[in-house]
Image (cartoon, rainbow, N blue to C red):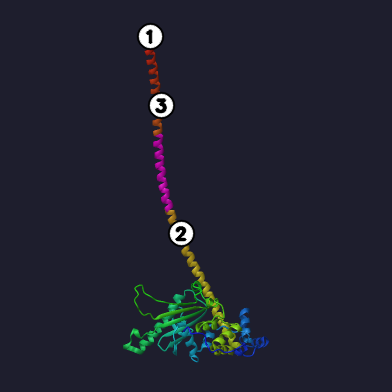
């Protein structure tokens, strides 16, 4: 809602005030060693294990971008005001939640997989909002978002039609909004930097005003982070900072400027008492992320393959076109060479005729010179006789 920085500030000076007293790494590792998540712990990458240990020790925050962490911290059934605040800031209007909807949607593939959403709520106006957290943005975001919003529209349609019966009207349907928050966004969004919020806008060439039910907002946290820390100017930026901050000084700065985040960080700190749960959720999140990364790579390879095939086909078409032009040129060249040969033959004939004519002229000149000589002799003899 673009409100200014909260004027009611706290004065937290240490991360301990949020996360409680630190614990020793040795005690934490001993607890993990004798827990039922030891196998999961050993399967986590060393750099991720270090992040978890720093959090469990109370020395650093932990991002909640995996859907399980996200749902546990937001808990819309217990704290609807949290998701209300986030959605309100993203949409730029006050939102009041009246119902938490099922996360499971329509079966969308032959294998029977379903649309599984992170948090789906119904607002006071009747609108439906789905908030999705993605560690890695998916390829084909527009196509995927269309599936999600279409599913939400059809779920609403079925419910409203069943409720209204013969009195049902399409005007009874309310907008649905999908908010996708990505830790690592795909190239479509990266190319739009420094813009980090992308709102779908539907218009018609004629300028007519026709209502559409589907709305989509993408948020690229990686682009947002590149803007730099300690530059929070409104509540929306505070929320996005909450999703990205891990270092103590960043967290302290945020809660001092926006005290309402203190409760969320204290909830996150509760996970420090349950290392097994943290490791279990983190391990599952990494498995999902690895699975998504694999899909991402497969889709990337598929895209590269399709692009390569398209470029090859384009190159083949251009080659065929060039060969056709070459054939046409060679044909024209052959015709030109034939005409040149004919012209050369005619030129040779003309040269021969010219040479023959020159020879005849030379002969006539010789004969004429002989006649001139004879005439000169006759004139001389005639002159002698007259004397």
Element type at mark 2: helix
- Check the image and report above or below for 179 versus 350: below
- Dot 2 corresponds to which residue? 316
How far is mark 2 from mark 3, CA to CA?
62 Å
- Dot 3 corresponds to which residue? 359
**Quarter of the image containing the C terminus?**
top left
- Check the image and report above or below for 210 versus 36: above
Q: Nearer the viewer, mark 2 or mark 3?
A: 3
Q: x, y (%) of residue 258?
A: 54, 87
Mark 2: few/some/many CA within 10 Å (<14, 14-19, 20+):
few
The residue at 39%/13% (across/down) is 377
Q: Disc 2, disc 3: CB below 8 Å?
A: no
Chief secondary structure of the magenta span?
helix
Q: Is residue 86 left or right of residue 23?
A: left
- Check the image and report above or below for 345 versus 321: above
Q: Nearer the viewer, mark 1 or mark 2?
A: 1
Residue 58 within the segment the image draws in magenta: no
Element type at mark 3: helix
The residue range painted magenta reads 325-349
Q: Nearer the viewer, mark 1 or mark 3?
A: 1
Element type at mark 1: helix
Q: Residue 320 sits in which quadrant? A: bottom left
Question: Farthest right residue?
Answer: 26
Q: Is residue 1 left or right of residue 375?
A: right
How far is mark 1 from mark 3, CA to CA?
38 Å
Q: Which tag, 1 or 3, sits closer to the chain's start?
A: 3
Residue 341 within the segment the image draws in magenta: yes
Q: Nearer the viewer, residue 202 or 144?
A: 202
- Dot 1 corresponds to which residue? 384
Q: x, y (%) of residue 174?
A: 38, 84
Residue 109 shows in this picture = no
């Amino acid at each position: 809602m673009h409100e200014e920085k909260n004027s009611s500030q706290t004065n937290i000076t240490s991360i301990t005030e949020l996360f409680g007293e630190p614990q020793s790494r040795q005690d934490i590792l001993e607890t993990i060693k004798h827990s039922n998540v030891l196998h999961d712990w050993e399967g986590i990458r060393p750099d991720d294990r270090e992040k978890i240990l720093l959090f469990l020790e109370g020395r650093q925050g932990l991002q909640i971008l995996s859907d399980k962490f996200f749902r546990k911290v937001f808990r819309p059934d217990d704290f609807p005001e949290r998701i209300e605040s986030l959605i309100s800031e993203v949409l730029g209007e006050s939102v009041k939640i009246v119902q938490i909807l099922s996360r499971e949607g329509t079966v969308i593939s032959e294998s029977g997989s379903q649309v599984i959403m992170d948090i789906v709520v119904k607002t006071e106006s009747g609108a439906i909002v789905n908030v999705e957290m993605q560690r890695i943005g998916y390829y084909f975001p527009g196509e995927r978002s269309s599936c999600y919003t279409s599913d939400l529209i059809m779920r609403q349609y079925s419910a409203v039609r069943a409720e209204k019966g013969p009195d049902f009207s399409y005007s009874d349907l309310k907008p649905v909004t999908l908010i996708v928050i990505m830790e690592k966004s795909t190239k479509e969004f990266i190319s739009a930097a420094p813009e980090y919020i992308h709102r779908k806008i539907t218009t018609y060439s004629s300028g007519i005003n026709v209502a559409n039910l589907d709305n989509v907002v993408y948020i690229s946290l990686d682009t947002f982070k590149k803007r730099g820390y300690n530059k929070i100017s409104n509540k929306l930026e505070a929320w996005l900072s909450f999703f990205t901050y891990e270092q103590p000084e960043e967290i302290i700065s945020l809660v001092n400027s926006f005290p309402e985040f203190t409760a969320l960080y204290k909830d996150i700190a509760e996970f420090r008492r349950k290392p097994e749960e943290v490791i279990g959720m983190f391990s599952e999140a990494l498995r999902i992320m690895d699975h998504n990364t694999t899909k991402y790579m497969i889709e990337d390879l598929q895209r590269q393959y399709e692009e390569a095939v398209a470029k090859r086909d384009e190159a083949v078409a251009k080659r065929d076109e060039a060969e056709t032009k070459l054939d046409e040129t060679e044909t024209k060249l052959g015709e030109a060479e034939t005409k040149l040969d004919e012209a050369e033959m005619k030129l040779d004939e003309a040269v021969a005729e010219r040479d023959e004519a020159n020879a005849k002229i030379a002969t006539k000149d010789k004969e004429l010179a002989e006649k001139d000589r004879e005439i000169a002799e006759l004139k001389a003899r005639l002159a002698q006789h007259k004397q």
